[in-house]
């Protein structure tokens, strides 16, 4: 008998027929003699509808109240799943994030998990209940409902799996594993049998929508193996595990893209010590994550500073940047939402040279201009015009010999 955590995303529970299908999978796992804890997202499209509704009231809804509002999506799903399983004759019990003792910080909309008590989960398991937990949510030390940000149910699942020392953490989604590129835009993308935590961490941070980045961080920190698989078939998916020697033989394992990028540039700022801190600190204090940062020196003791943020944070970041620009006597603040980030990833890059040169040459051959460049030990990223995204992905996928052989 194993203790298994299963997480199902919004597309997997998008309507009642899909909920019944997932209930059948859960029941099958339970009937095999396993203890089962299920983490659910909101039904597909529900979170976006709730956001749209709030933004019809005001452009910048109160963040605390948005957490209260958005948490209702998962609450609906877990209740419907428990009702479905009970109608099938199974003992099931739904609980919300705070009932599962998911303690977070107080960063509304982007809360981070501090701890999971899991006492209630263990008690329910002891009574042979199938435990259905609302993902994406928790509560801070004052009891306020918090949400974990987009994809937060993945983090909930891995964190719960770690807290209850589960034998497996299965992430069910609408794809049947992790691919070398997005198969929706690259028809020759291949499913990977396994991938390292480090590679998956880079992929998650660079636009791959299979797993949320913090879920991978949790898995790597607590050594929780993740099985990414489809909720619509019985095929084996991709295991996310510790790195092994064979993984280093592959120079590039995947090509990712992210269209949720925006660029902000402050022109003609004083070139003096501490200027970058003056610009970026207010951005950080607003809970906005800055990605790539580039500074270009001008003549006359002036400089330009460019950085990227997510499109969802673009309006707020622009507003803050314009306020800062007036305080430091900078010139114009310009923004661009029509950009994308293209990345090549692989642990084999640590021991092989020439990857950057090959990437740049491939993009140049397609007449794709590189706007910004960022690197890590196992990743090279380029900011390009958004309209070239699909061409760039397919070209790089072929150049690094990732195409499925047909």
Image: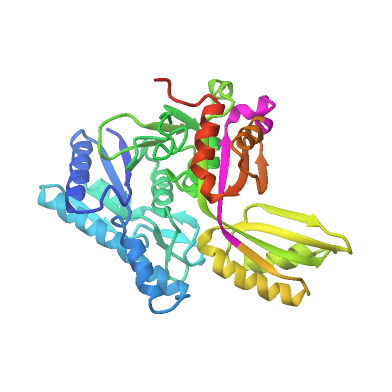
Region of the chain picked out in magenta, as a range: 336-357
Using the image, determine if residue 205 lies above or below residue 248. below
Relative side of 122 to 242, left or right: left
Q: Is residue 98 above or below residue 195?
A: below
Residue 351 on the magenta span: yes
Residue at image coords 21%, 34%: 33
Residue 54 or 224: which is nearer the viewer? 54
Residue shown at the point (42%, 47%) measured from the top left: 163
Q: Whole-percent x and y of residue 219?
A: 48, 41
User: Which sits in the foreground, 63 or 112?
Assistant: 63
Write the residue at 39% across / 40% down.
184
Query: Could you tell me residue 195's position as x and y percent?
Result: 48, 31
Whether residue 200 is visible to the viewer of this picture, yes or no, is: no
| Residue at (75% x, 62% y) in the render | 276
**Is residue 177 shown above or below 82?**
above
Q: Nearer the viewer, residue 342 or 173?
A: 342
């Amino acid at each position: 008998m194993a203790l298994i955590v299963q997480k199902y995303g919004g597309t997997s529970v998008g309507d009642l027929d899909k909920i019944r299908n997932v209930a059948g999978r859960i029941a099958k796992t339970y009937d095999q003699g396993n203890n089962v804890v299920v983490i659910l997202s909101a039904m597909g499209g529900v979170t976006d509808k709730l956001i749209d509704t709030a933004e019809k009231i005001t452009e910048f809804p109160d963040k605390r109240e948005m957490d209260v509002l958005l948490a209702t999506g998962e609450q609906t799903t877990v209740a419907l799943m428990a009702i479905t399983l009970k109608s099938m004759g199974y003992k099931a019990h739904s609980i919300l994030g705070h009932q599962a003792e998911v303690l977070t910080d107080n960063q509304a909309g982007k809360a981070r998990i501090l701890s999971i008590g899991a006492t209630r989960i263990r008690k329910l398991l002891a009574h042979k209940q199938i435990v259905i937990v609302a993902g994406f949510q928790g509560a801070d030390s004052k009891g306020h409902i918090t949400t974990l940000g987009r994809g937060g149910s993945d983090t909930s699942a891995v964190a719960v799996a770690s807290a209850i020392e589960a034998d497996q953490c299965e992430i069910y989604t609408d794809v049947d594993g992790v691919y070398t590129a997005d198969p929706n835009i690259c028809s020759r993308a291949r499913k990977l049998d396994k991938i390292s935590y480090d590679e998956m961490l880079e992929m998650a941070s660079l636009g791959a929508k299979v797993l949320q980045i913090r879920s991978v961080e949790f898995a790597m920190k607590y050594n929780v193996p993740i099985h990414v698989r489809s909720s619509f078939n019985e095929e084996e998916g991709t295991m996310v595990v510790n790195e092994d020697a064979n993984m280093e033989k592959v120079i590039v394992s995947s090509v990712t893209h992210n269209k949720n990028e925006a660029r902000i540039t402050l022109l003609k700022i004083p070139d003096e010590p501490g200027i970058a801190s003056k610009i970026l600190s207010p951005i950080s204090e607003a809970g906005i994550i800055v990605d790539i940062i580039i500074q270009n020196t001008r003549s006359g003791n002036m400089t330009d500073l460019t950085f990227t943020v997510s499109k969802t944070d673009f309006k707020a970041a622009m507003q803050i940047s314009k306020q800062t620009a007036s305080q430091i006597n900078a010139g114009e603040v310009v923004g661009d939402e029509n950009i994308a980030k293209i990345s090549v990833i692989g642990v084999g890059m640590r021991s092989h040279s020439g990857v950057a040169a090959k990437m740049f040459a491939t993009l140049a051959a397609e007449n794709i201009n590189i706007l910004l460049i960022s690197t890590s030990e196992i990743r090279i990223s380029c900011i390009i015009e958004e309209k070239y995204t699909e061409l760039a992905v397919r070209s790089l996928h072929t150049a690094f010999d990732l195409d499925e052989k047909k």
